[in-house]
Structure formats: structure tokens, C-alpha cells
Amino acid sequence: MSKEYPELHLSSDQAALLGIDFKEICRLALGNKIIRVTADITDDGGESLTTITPELSLALNLPEGWEFNLRQDGDKLRIGPLVAIMTDAYHPKRASFGSQDSFFRGLLSSMNQLNGWAYVFTPQDINWQKNRIYGYYLLSPRRNWQRAWFPFPDVCYNRYFKHSSTVPANTPVSMARLQGRVKTFNSHIGTKIKVHRQLAQEPDIAAHLPDTRLFSSVGQLSSMLNKYRAVYIKPVNGSQGQGIAKVNKINRGYSVKTSSASKEFKHESLAEIMKMIRSASPGKQLIIQQAIRVSGQPHFDFRLLIQRDLRGHWSVTGIAARIGTKATITTNLHTGGHAVSLPKVLESRGFGAQQIATIQQEMEGLALRIAKTIAKSARLIGELGLDFMVDHRGKVWFLEANPKPARASFAQIDKDLRSQTIARPMEFAYHLAGF
């Protein structure tokens, strides 16, 4: 007696396109898992989707009745794409992924709309002996997270943040091992100084880069303050506006303000300033960067999100102006900043309509060149948060790139825009998976 395999529903058009006969036994892949199925050919249906039968649902942990993409993959068929989103921690007491929870829900919903499947996991959820991952999934964006064993995915989207020093010892090894087996996008792009040096090799980009160097000595700090009057000092691997200091040259000495304190400190001695900066970031490598003078107060900058789409092409999704407070030196929403549209902030600072249009066009063109340049040396990049400033004369300056950008600024401007920023990574994953 022949073994019975789960049925795979194919339309007559699909079967003809794939060269498959009725009741033919085929190999079917989902991620790294391969099972045998029996082809069931019907007269209805399209050329690229298949409906999950009860037997397939049990075999692959996919929801019964849902439609998935189907394509030829060498000597087998493949459904998907199967996409995994890597993060650092799930919080069982809150049944949540913390600040990224609504973002992850949006990602899974976006992949469902593309007729694929996505789940969330941490490096500790990987079972290397059985080549599977104990991931978190949703059957509805409003329901609670559920868990199941899934195959290794076609594509992994890296949203892992190291929030503390209590990271399990095997985490870096697991992450590197996974990247060796699965197409993984948006991992590390390098330090701020590495990216700056890479971009400085491109003449059309170099003209828009502020003077940026590795922070080394009191003499260097004095020289740059004499030249620019104000500088920022940042960790080379910093994020979310943490660990930043701004130093100003004033009439009787110097002033310094950090991102973690609301009070400004004044000193006559640069050596004291140096001690204060080093004690705020012990053991960390720092950069020193020319401060850009903006028009009016409070200070502001721009977060531009550039992403790749279903065809793998780069395009600008949106630009948000971030306005800081008088009490802080950064514009990050984490430190009290708020977001408005680019035209609104520039108009409020005295720029005319034609100049605003020119500035936006220049910023978007520069962003495309920067993304393509960074992508040349990065492993796989699907999106970048690029930070820009516009000085009091209207010149566009590029500050830094973030491979794991937040969406909060765009949510404050336009909820539909935020939805688009969430959909794009899943579109790029779909492209990488070959569907």
C-alpha cells in the first residue's frame, strides 16, 4: 500500500505551467523544510497561489485555508516566502516585544498581505540540532502572540538591539552562524567613522559631510573648537542619541552639555572638559564632529527613510523633521523631540517655497547616492535611516546612517506613511526570497 501524502491544491493553469500531473508526488519546500505532497488539480484558481489544506497545515504549521505563493525551485516546488524577524527579547509578563511590538505586528500583517508567512524569534530560540526555530506568530494583528516550531526561513530581517551587557554568551555566534545559512538583511554597516570615511571617497557626497574625526586629544579638541566654535562628540557605535556631548567655545572658556543631562556646565580648562567626556563614556571609542549652525531655535534635523522595494530598487519613503527642546542637545524623540514635515520647519525658519523644494530634491538625491555607496560594502541592506541637517544658508549636510531605523517620527506626521515604512521591509524580503 502506497504512503499517503498531504494534498497540494493546484489549478489546471498552475499544473500546466509547472508540468505536474494529477496525483503526481512532488517535493514541496517551506524555508529549509522539504516534504512530499500529492498534486490535486482543480479547474479554479490562479497561476501563483495555493490554498493550505488541513494536511498541509499540520505538516508545515501554516494556517488552514490561507493562500500562499507557489513557485518552481529547481527540482521541487516552494511556498512562501517564509520570513523570520530577529529581535533581542520577548517579555512574557507583558506578552510583548516591548517598544517594537506594534512594529512586528505590522510586519507580519504586511507579509500576510503578500501571501507569505512571517514569525519573530530571538537567537536563543534556535535549535541547531534539529535545524528549526521556536518562533512567535499571529493569526490576527489584534490577537496574542502564539508559539510554534518553524523551519529556518528563506530570509531573515535583523531587528536585534543589544540593550544590556547581559547578552547570553552564545548570541554573537548564533547570529553569525544564522547569517551564514540564511539571507539576512540590515545587520551592522560599520562604525560612524568607517561609514564617514567610505562616503568621503565619493566627491559628490564628501562636499556634504561635516568634518568628522576619531576623538584623540585635548589638542585636537582645541583645534576644532578654534575652527568651528562648536563640536559634537559621540560614541562610534552609539544610537538613540545616547552618550553625546556638545562643546561650545564661549567668551570665558568653554561650555559642555551631554544628552543625559539638562544642565550646561562651564569650564575654563579644556582638560576638565576632556575628563568629563571620557567619564561619561568610559572605555568607548568616540568621534568628534563639526557642529552645523541651523537657522533659529530650537535646533532641528531630518530623518530620511530610504528603502528597497519588491524589485530591490532604492527609493525615499519619507522625510521627517525632528525638532529638539531647549533643554537637550539632540532631536531624538526618546529625549523629548517631536516631528513635523520638512516644508513646515523650513518655512518657519524663513526659507521660501522654491528654496524648500530645491533642498528636498537635493536631500533625496544625496540619500540615494549614500545608500548605494553604503550597500557596496554592507552584507545586505534593505533600508537606512539617514540623518541630515540644513544650515542657516540652506546647505544640506549628511550626519550619519542607521541600519535599524525607528518609525516613530513618521507616525507623528502621517499614519499612512508609517504603514508604508512597515510594508517595505517585507516587500524587500519577498524580493530576496525569489517570489
Image (tube, rainbow, N blue to C red):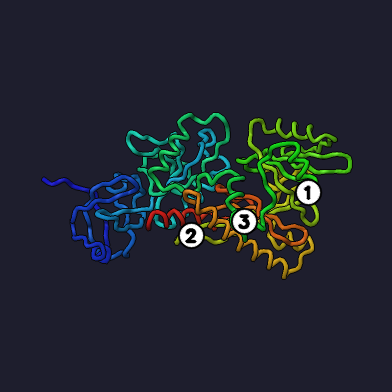
* Residue 185 spot, x, y in % from top left: 47, 49
The relative height of residue 373 versus residue 184 in the rendered view (above or below) is below
Give amino acid for label 2: Asp
Looking at this view, name the residue that lies furthest to the left.
Answer: 1
- Disc 1 to disc 3, how far (Cα)? 29 Å
Between 179 and 55, the one nearer to me in the picture: 179
Residue at 32% over, 65% down? 46
| Residue 138 seen anywhere in this rendered image of the structure | no
Give amino acid for label 3: Leu
Is the N terminus in the top left, top right, bottom left or bottom right quadrant?
Answer: top left
Mark 2 Cα within 10 Å, few/some/many (few <14, many 20+)? many
| Numbered disc in front, either 1 or 3 | 1
Q: Would you identify the image quadrant in which residue 40 lies?
A: bottom left
Between 197 and 435, the one nearer to me in the picture: 197
| Label 3: element kind | strand
Numbered mark located on residue 3 in the image: none
Residue indicated by mark 3: 304
Residue indicated by mark 1: 227
| Label 2: element kind | loop
Q: Are marks 2 and 3 in contact (CB under 8 Å)?
A: no
Give amino acid for label 1: Lys
Residue indicated by mark 2: 309
Q: Earlier in the sequence, mark 1 or mark 3?
A: 1
* Residue 192 spot, x, y in % from top left: 61, 45
| Label 1: element kind | helix
| Residue 77 seen anywhere in this rendered image of the structure | yes
